[in-house]
């Protein structure tokens, strides 16, 4: 009888050990996405497509996000998400797909989330869709920003109305201080500003003045409108205030 009880006890202990091991083996961090694939359908080249994934800790241990990597074209717009998720906790992951340069291409971009479970990490997310190329009469806004410059005619309004280079805006020399004070830091740091006066002398002074105020890319057109007309004639000139 004692031997039977002893055998049963040993069997019971073994079963308890096996059960404990099984429970322990189930304790793991597991990160999953509600929808791991985000299909934005079709987007015109040059537009930025917002992309949102919802990821959740479906395991029994805390998820500790170690790093997130992404393919070119996918950009996280805001601050990084929290890097620790409790069991059952979820968080939204926001990205922007920048479509400039992908015209006519069916994209398939990945985002990989590495976390504290080598068996399951990384969690891979996919952004897919078709980028429609621009029409011959269209231009992506990013192209304009990349090549952006401003042509400022600093002559008087009357002289500006008589003739000026097409596309120029009129900011008389006397008003440049006020105009500069209203410009944003991005304009000061990144925008090429061409200044034009009748013969270039006044725009030289204006360019030096604006550079002292922080407009590091401000330039004076050498010879001004006179030199422009000498090289290009009147074909690119316009008369009137518009």
Image (cartoon, rainbow, N blue to C red):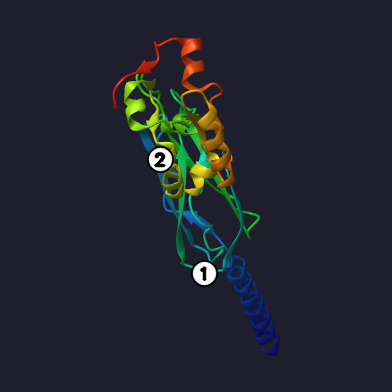
Q: Could you tell me how far apart the alpha carbons at marks 2 and 1 are, in whole angstroms? A: 30 Å
Q: Position of residue 127 (x, y in %)?
A: 46, 40
Count of numbered circles on the image = 2
Identify whether 121 is placed above or below 140. Answer: below
The residue lying toward the viewer, choosing from 155 and 125, is 155
Q: Position of residue 190 (x, y in %)?
A: 54, 40
Quadrant in the picture for the N terminus = bottom right
Q: Is residue 40 left or right of residue 67?
A: left
Quadrant in the picture for the C terminus = top left
Q: What secondary structure is found at the residue carrying circle 1?
A: loop
Q: What secondary structure is found at the residue carrying circle 2?
A: strand
> Residue placed farthest to the bottom in the image?
2
| Residue identified by numbered label 2 | 49
The residue lying toward the viewer, choosing from 186 and 77, is 186
Q: Quadrant of residue 13?
A: bottom right
| Residue identified by numbered label 1 | 86
Q: Position of residue 141 (x, y in %)?
A: 41, 32
Instruction: Indicate which disc, 2 or 1, sits on the residue closer to the N terminus.
Output: 2
Residue at 33% across, 21% down: 162
Q: Position of residue 188 (x, y in %)?
A: 52, 44
Identify whether 219 is placed above or below 123. Answer: above
Q: Quadrant of residue 43?
A: top left
The residue lying toward the viewer, choosing from 73 and 26, is 73
């Amino acid at each position: 009888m004692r031997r039977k009880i002893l055998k049963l006890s040993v069997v019971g202990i073994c079963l308890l050990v096996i059960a404990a091991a099984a429970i322990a083996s189930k304790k793991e961090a597991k990160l999953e996405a509600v929808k791991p694939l985000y299909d934005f359908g079709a987007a015109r080249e040059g537009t930025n497509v917002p992309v949102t994934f919802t990821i959740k800790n479906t395991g029994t241990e805390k998820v500790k996000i170690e790093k997130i990597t992404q393919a070119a074209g996918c950009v996280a717009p805001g601050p990084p998400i929290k890097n620790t998720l409790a069991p059952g906790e979820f968080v939204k992951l926001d990205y922007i797909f920048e479509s400039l340069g992908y015209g006519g291409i069916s994209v398939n971009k990945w985002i990989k989330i590495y976390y504290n479970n080598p068996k399951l990490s990384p969690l891979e997310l996919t952004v897919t869709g078709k980028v429609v190329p621009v029409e011959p009469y269209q231009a992506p806004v990013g192209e304009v920003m990349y090549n952006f410059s401003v042509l400022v005619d600093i002559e008087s309004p009357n002289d500006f109305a008589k003739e000026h280079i097409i596309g120029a805006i009129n900011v008389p020399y006397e008003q440049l201080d006020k105009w500069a004070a209203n410009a944003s830091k991005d304009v000061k740091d990144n925008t090429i500003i061409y200044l034009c006066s009748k013969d270039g002398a006044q725009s030289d002074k204006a360019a030096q003045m604006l550079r002292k105020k922080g407009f590091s890319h401000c330039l004076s057109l050498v010879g001004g409108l006179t030199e422009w007309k000498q090289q290009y004639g009147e074909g690119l000139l316009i008369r009137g205030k518009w």
